[in-house]
Amino acid sequence: MNRTVASCLAPVLLLLATTVPCTMASAQLARAEGVWNGGAEGEPVLRVRRFAPGFWIIRQGKRSNPEAPFMYLIAGRDSALLLDTGASPTDGRAVPLVGVVDSLLATLDAGRAWPLLVLHSHGHGDHRALDTALAARPGTHVVPADTAVLVTAIGLASWPDAPAAPIQLGGRTVLLLPTPGHQPAHVMLYDVRTRTLLSGDMLYPGLLTVRDLTAFRASVARLGHFAASHTITNVLGAHVEMTRQPGRMYPLGSIAQPAEHALALPPASVQWLAKATHDAGDFIGRVRHDEFILGRVQPASTDRPSVHGMLLFGGDRVFLSHLPMSRTPHDYQLVFEAQLPASTLQQYRRDRAAHLNELYTIEPATQWVLPNTIRLDTVFRAHVYRGHFERGGVRIASDVAVTVREVVMFRKFETADRMQPTAWFTVGDATERFLVHRIAGRGDVDQVLQLCPGARRARDGASVLLAAGTGSRVGTKTPLGVICRVLYTERADLAQ
């Protein structure tokens, strides 16, 4: 090792020498992994923690690259496997990954030249930047993140529906499971010895970007079948972007993450991902879970422009709920928190206080395509009505700016959806909390209920099950409180 490389590795090796070995249970790992430094001043380019004998976690520092990807080195008796090679440094410092890998393997056997197989969780640039440096290492085989190459190199029967393929390292087996959807060549690895799932960018505490929803759903199902026949003790992903506050993440590109979520997710996260993906349906934008956020990259819609009226409710916090129909281009359920101009908000609140039993709606001032228009922080103009804007409502404000603050639910109706009378989700807070029925589509009911003051606090968008028929009964107790008022009920528009 030359002096320059040794100097680069010094902070990494010091950390390695002082790190307590991790045990295999997720809770114990969460305690043992400590703080990864989260972009703190002076953090090293790479940090290393020994997870188990012959198994190391390597993280690139956020000051080296804000993506701060995790890499994993697993050694058997005969050879070793490295998953991912990191991101290009943005701070000008070299990333001494080759030297770190050699130093770690030398702790097992300093006298041998270790054969190394390099794989990628997927093909995005923040996971393969050091490929060229690794390829120049003697005895190293770098497999590109390409589906055709993977099928041949790993011995998969086909892509992506083949059973998990074994990779033998000598007394240690790692299974490769195809999981496209985030990226076409995405895979997960499973270390049989530690029962650890390396889940890449498909499952980690952060924004799980879905680029192909059909493929992603199929991969979630494939992962579920795998988990049913393989005990999973730990789930380790490729990034950490969530905070310790449930459902909240740092802005993408953040350098400092002083209170970031632990790297490890529990085994139940596989089921959480399956439920979240199922409940989200043909979703648009983002769907929030306590431990991760589903974010869909979606092509522009080909719907025709139309007027998309919305129910307006809430006082301290204002929400809008799209008034859907079962036919295109109105076949979407959309609920979001909105911001109105201060003068309009005061006017609406005064009118609402004087007409306690009235509903309020808005009518967009122009026609537009719903999924192409509703985005976080976008603005559209609309008229505000007391009553239904198409059924004799009284206009109380004209041509006001409406800003999208946070989307709670946005999904397109699917023909395979089944009506679920017990499926509801919440919006609001302890001051004003509302229950909104999850609409399946044709023949269902659009309904918004208000809970009595003092309702139990729940995160916006949290799902809750109510007994069938609850939506029509004021005074019924729910898991979050008592129903005080039925704000809105509509069946006819969804019956067509």
Image (cartoon, rainbow, N blue to C red):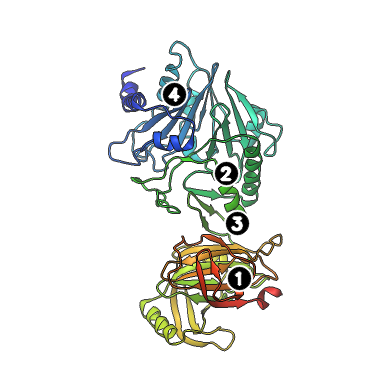
Q: Nearer the viewer, mark 2 or mark 4?
A: 2
Which quadrant, please, contains the N terminus?
Answer: top left
Which residue has dot 3 on it? Answer: 279
- Towards the viewer: 142 or 52: 52
- Towards the viewer: 41 or 455: 455
Dot 4 amino acid type: Val
Q: Which of marks 2 and 1 is nearer the N terminus?
A: 2
Residue shown at the point (53%, 58%) measured from the top left: 285
Q: Residue 470 carries which label?
A: 1
Spatial separation of the CA atoms under disc 2 and disc 3: 14 Å
State yes or no: discs 3 and 1 in contact (Cβ < 8 Å).
Answer: no
Which residue has dot 4 on it? Answer: 101
Spatial separation of the CA atoms under disc 3 and disc 1: 20 Å
Q: What element carries label 2?
A: helix
Q: What element carries label 3?
A: helix
Residue 383 location (% of width, % of height): 48, 81
Spatial separation of the CA atoms under disc 2 and disc 1: 31 Å
